[in-house]
Amino acid sequence: MKQALHDMNPSIKFLVTTICMLTLAFFFNPWTPLICWVGVILLQLCFSSINWKKWFLFMIPFVIMSFGYFWTTIVFAEERTGAIVWSVFHYDITKAQLDHALSLSFRVLAFAGLSLLFAFTTDPTKFILSLMQQLKLSPKIAYSILVGYQFLPVMKEEFVHIQQAHRLRGAVRDRNVLVRLWNLRRILLPMLAGAVRKAERSAFAMEARGFTGEKRTEFYQVISVGKNDMILSSLFFLIIVAGCSSANWI
Amino acid sequence: MHEVIMFDSVGFRYPDETSWLVEDLSFSIQAGERVVMTGPSGCGKSTILFLINRLYPENCDGELKGRVKLLGKDGNEYAPGEVNHRIATVFQDPDAQFCMRTVEEELAFTLENLRTPRSEMDRKIDEVLRMTELTNYRHAVIQQLSGGEKQRIALACALIMEPDILLLDEPLSHLDPLAAHSFVTLLNRLQQEQGFTVVAIEHHLDLWDNFFQRELVLFEQPHVKEIRKRQAAKQNECALRVKKLSTASFLQDASFALQKGEVAVLAGQNGSGKSTMLKALAGLISAKGTVTPNTLGYVPQSPEFLFVTKTVEEEIAYGGGGRTHELMEALQLTKVADSHPFAVSHGQKRRVAIAAMLNDGREVILMDEPTAGQDAVSLHELFRLIDERASEGTAFLIVTHDMEFAYAIADRVLLMKEGKLTGAFEADEVWRNPKLLAAHRLMMPKGALEHEASFA
């Protein structure tokens, strides 16, 4: 049970979360996104074993962003007529204003919740393999992404190495962030040169092993679609339906 | 015996180039042969390898003339990728020939390319892992393995195709001597068992012992004077004093000193902490202990990592030193003074880096693996550079796997093992002590053996 979301077919999970997000975009009231957000969290509590500490850390920027939306919508609202429901720091907040603000900020949270659910329960390699097997993604693109993914740690190491070398030359870090960004080009140039070389080598290595980019018929790691995927997809849709219909009865 | 590769007056040139890189080349290779192709770097050895596995001419739009016959069929008659099912390649760079995360996935990638039925995949993976003695590595993450292990995996990936011909593109150049030795031993056994043809390009035949039956000299090596053991130029003045240098995680208390004009080699197997030591000395990573003087020169394996300006001259003057012209003269860089430092040759880049360091008043130079992947000519150039500078009083600390080079250049040898400096020995003491070398997984340099023999 605790692994169900991790074991779910990544392509299906991707499609379902995308549909959920698109649907949410059509509903502009505080309750739909709130119910969806809570539903998604419940789903993760029941069917996944994610690292909640990490989840909270990743959620922090979204919470700040959603508060920002909330605050700006209230302060800069166009309509200021209607029943006042709340008064704070000489601001009179009307029902319509509050609804607007809450819908926007909950929407941010709901989108963040869905994205994090996908990100934390999906293995990137399996996702790409599944895209290739279920959604017929071209192997050329799929394997390019996989190779790129393998390069990331090497690139990071190289970045640190060049940075250290430059510090040795006495290239001091400038106080000004913009200048610092502009100076980054000195690090990126050798990295780019190295990356182009490496990419060519990798491409050659892959072709030398018979990779042609044609559609494949045999897979070693078969990513299947099963009953588990049906059940979880229905749960996702149940949450979204509950959220959407709440617009009518609240 | 039958012919598997036949080149009949083959010529090749890259697009937009007027001169032929390879011209009128003819040779043939029989099934089951072990052939090595030699020639200086940049002469087109790799190009010929790419003509055999058909990565060229398609991938670079180069122009090919003459006839290449592979496994009894004209090269042009093969469909893209078809010949790669029978001709496998192991490349030079252990970091740029894998596309999956784990060993198992990588092997499966190859089998999927061959359209092997899924039911047979498991058996084939098992078999090739057993053959290459990698059974325990089946689920290992490739990026976390050492260079030697990665090259073994690359070999496994090539052999899982059950190829007729195995091509090797300088497969040892990034390995430490013992890893290289065990790679050759393994390949020797596998070739005897399976009987595939081996075609390699390599400019460092020392590590291969008598593996190859035939050497195909593609281009005559420009005559390089053999690197002779250099005369020590040690002066009686301390250049570097290190006391109790350690890093939080790995490096343990290391103390040693270098004299002016002394050349020391830092050796030990991969992962013993040599690079960490250099970085700690150069102050690139935080470390405890004292290093006097506190500014040392550092030349990474890719010297271009150091470059921050647009011309060689500016590069050398960047630190504000007043000896720019003098040093450019001394290091033969005057001709390229206005070139972009990225656009000069590898040897020149290294000279620029050293000149810049010396101009900053950094009289001790630390070099990280300057010998990796260098052919005889550039090794000789490196040797001369160090020798010249040392006689001017610069002290060097050089990390290298190339024991022949170390034998020729070193006054002293610093040995490392598991993050610990086990000692700073007089060089001759180390070469005379096989036990000490073996304990640090190092090979006895041939030069030392000959020397011993002549005195026996």
Image (cartoon, coloured by chain):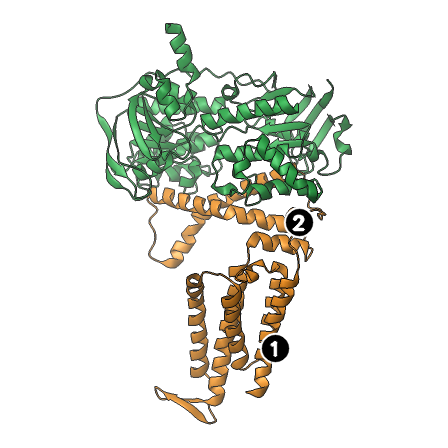
Position of the C terminus of chain B, as image quadrant, is top left
Which shade is chain B?
A: green
Mark 1 / mark 2, whichever is N-terminal: 2
* Residue highlighted by disc 1: A241
- A170, above or below B345, in the image: below
Q: Is residue A104 above or below residue B155?
A: below
| Residue at x-position 43% and y-position 42% | B310
Residue count near mark 1 (Cα–Cα under 10 Å), binned few <14, some 14–19, many ≥20: some
Frontmost residue, B60 versus B126? B126
- Percent of width and height locating residue B63: 70, 33
Q: Around disc 2, counting alpha carbons within 10 Å, would you say few (fewer than 14), some (14 to 19), or many (20 or more)?
A: many
The residue that label 2 is drawn on is: A139
Please tell me which residue lies in front, B332 or B69: B69
- Chain given the colour orange: A
Amino acid under label 1? Val
Chain on which label 2 sits? A
Dot 2 falls on a residue whose secondary structure is helix
Q: Residue at x 42, y 20 (%)?
A: B404
Q: Residue furthest bottom?
A: A83
Left or right? Give the position of B237 relative to B154: left
Residue at the front extreme, as displayed: A1
Task: Give coordinates of residue A219: x percent, y percent.
Answer: 67, 47
On the question of residue B123 being in view, the answer is: yes
